[in-house]
Image (cartoon, helix red, strand yellow):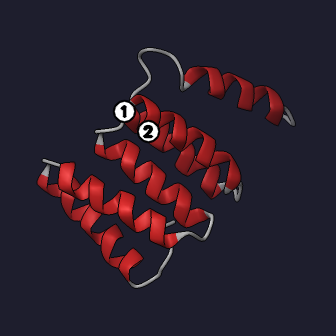
Amino acid sequence: MNKQAEADAVMKEAINLPDATAGQILGYGKNLIAQKRPKDPMVVFETGYKRFPTVPAALVGMARGYSANGDNKKALKFAQDASKLETNSTAKATIDGLVKKLEKGESIN
């Protein structure tokens, strides 16, 4: 509907709502990456990280954001930290796959 600015404003407000989860923030940021808007998700992921600094999904968001902007070194650090914190074996395996890609210098997006 050509209302990108309005949609962005609503989502900026939404990610700051008290009931917004780290997973929802990660999902929104990944959606922006898929839209080929690599700078925009960093603001989203940084918001998630500030709100949830010890939640693996927020750390994965930072990793995806840095990777989308070509900084796989910083992305790797966040992915490794997320792996250390993740307690769910399935999610940990997924994060470990991201770590392996980043170690090879590959994008995770």
Q: Position of residue 20 (x, y in %)?
A: 44, 23
Q: Position of residue 95 (x, y in %)?
A: 29, 61
- Real-space Cα distance between discs 1 and 2? 5 Å
Q: Position of residue 94 (x, y in %)?
A: 27, 62
Left or right relative to 3: residue 55 = left
Image: 106 above or below 33: below
Checking the image for residue 6, the label placed there is none
Q: Residue furthest top?
A: 18
Q: Can the viewer see residue 108?
A: no
Looking at the rendering, which quadrant does residue 33 occupy? bottom right
**Amino acid marked by disc 1:** Phe
Circles 1 and 2, Cβ within 8 Å, touching? The answer is yes
Image: 27 above or below 90: above
Looking at the rendering, which quadrant does residue 16 occupy? top right
Q: Position of residue 38 (x, y in %)?
A: 67, 57
Mark 1 residue element:
loop
Name the one closer to the observer, 67 or 35: 67
At 70% from the left and 59% from the top, the residue drawn is 36
Q: Residue furthest right?
A: 2
At 72% from the left and 32% from the top, the residue drawn is 8
Q: Residues within 10 Å of mark 1 (few under 14, many from 20)?
A: some
The residue where tag 1 is placed is 52
Left or right relative to 103: residue 17 = right
Specify the quadrant that holds the N terminus.
top right
At 46% from the left and 43% from the top, the residue drawn is 26
The residue where tag 2 is placed is 49
Mark 2 residue element:
helix
Left or right relative to 38: residue 25 = left
**Amino acid marked by disc 2:** Tyr
Image: 46 above or below 38: above
Q: Residues within 10 Å of mark 2 (few under 14, many from 20)?
A: many
Q: Can the viewer see residue 91?
A: yes
